[in-house]
Image (cartoon, rainbow, N blue to C red):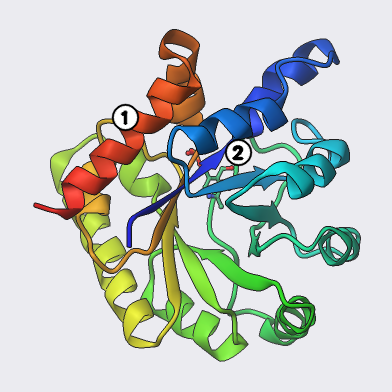
Amino acid sequence: MSRLSVNVDHVATVRQARLASEPDPVTAAAIAELAGADGITVHLREDRRHIQDRDLYILRKTIKTRLNLEMAATKEMFDIALEVKPDMVTIVPEKRQELTTEGGLDVKTNPDPLKRYVQGLRDAGISVNLFVDPSPDAVKACHRIGSDGLEIHTGRYAEAFQDNVKEAELKRIYDAAVLSKRLGLKTHAGHGLDYNNVQNVAAMQEFDEFAIGYSIISRSIYTGIENAVREMKRLIVASRSK
Ligand code: PXP
């Protein structure tokens, strides 16, 4: 499978810069779907810096594909998820000062509360992924916790400058993806993927889905959302058929 879930947070970032009503991530999501997106991702942050509750509730009613809600494992978010019932929740760590999600979730230190949290969401019929660094221990911990799957953090690969570092990060991603598949987990990838670096990750057949936001929304300023989504989808599909 080579699904692309388009993260529309940064459409909301522009809107919030003026606390105005446009550009609207709901409209962006509809155009992304028309261009071939297989899903829409939004991160409802505790500080509401981009996506607002209103966006989430409207998207739930309007999108035709799958809604993935990225959120921190808090009580507030749990209640919202149970009300909105996204198709999928991706649990991410969240720090107030960060520009974007900086690292994978700590799934090892204190897994029991997380296990109960995941179970509560799954009992409500929501598929749950955990956003983790590409390490075998993290993958095994997701399996023990009982999530449906995981999303492997590709940020360190995406940010690597030197070829040897990039290669090493790709190997970590690959090994984690192979292990994840072997354990029967849904295996997704995301963070920092763009038009120049997605190919190496998309070529790994172990991945079911890619969550990509910043590069697509950035390019859409020049080419429009439709072209930006279409091109990313084309790159993913082409990388997989090599
Ligand atoms: N996956 C997760 C868990 C994220 O937190 C983000 C950023 O919101 C993304 C994917 C998308 O990353 P980017 O915007 O760098 O494509």
Q: Is residue 83 left or right of residue 130?
A: right
Secondary structure beneath label 1: helix
**Is residue 210 positioned above or below 162 on the image?**
below
**Is residue 229 positioned above or below 238 on the image?**
above
User: How many numbered marks appear?
Assistant: 2
**Which numbered disc covers residue 139?**
none
Secondary structure beneath label 2: loop
Residue at (14%, 47%) from the top-left corner? 164
Residue contact at pointers 2 and 1, CB within 8 angstroms: no
Say which of 66 and 166 sits in front.
66
List x then y, in percent, for residue 77.
84, 59
Does the numbered disc 2 mark a residue whose Cβ is under 8 Å from ligand 1? yes
Q: Residues within 10 Å of mark 2 (few under 14, many from 20)?
A: few
Q: Nearer the viewer, mark 2 or mark 1?
A: 1
Amino acid type at image mark 1: Glu
Residue at (71%, 32%) from the top-left corner? 26
List x then y, in percent, for residue 186.
45, 73
Q: Looking at the image, is mark 2 or mark 1 earlier in the sequence? A: 2
Identify residue for label 2: 100
Does the image show residue 109? yes
**Is residue 134 positioned above or below 15 on the image?**
below
How far, Cα to Cα, is label 2 from label 1? Answer: 24 Å
List x then y, in percent, for residue 150.
50, 69
Quadrant into which the N terminus falls: bottom left
Identify residue for label 1: 231
Amino acid type at image mark 2: Thr
Does the image show residue 165? no
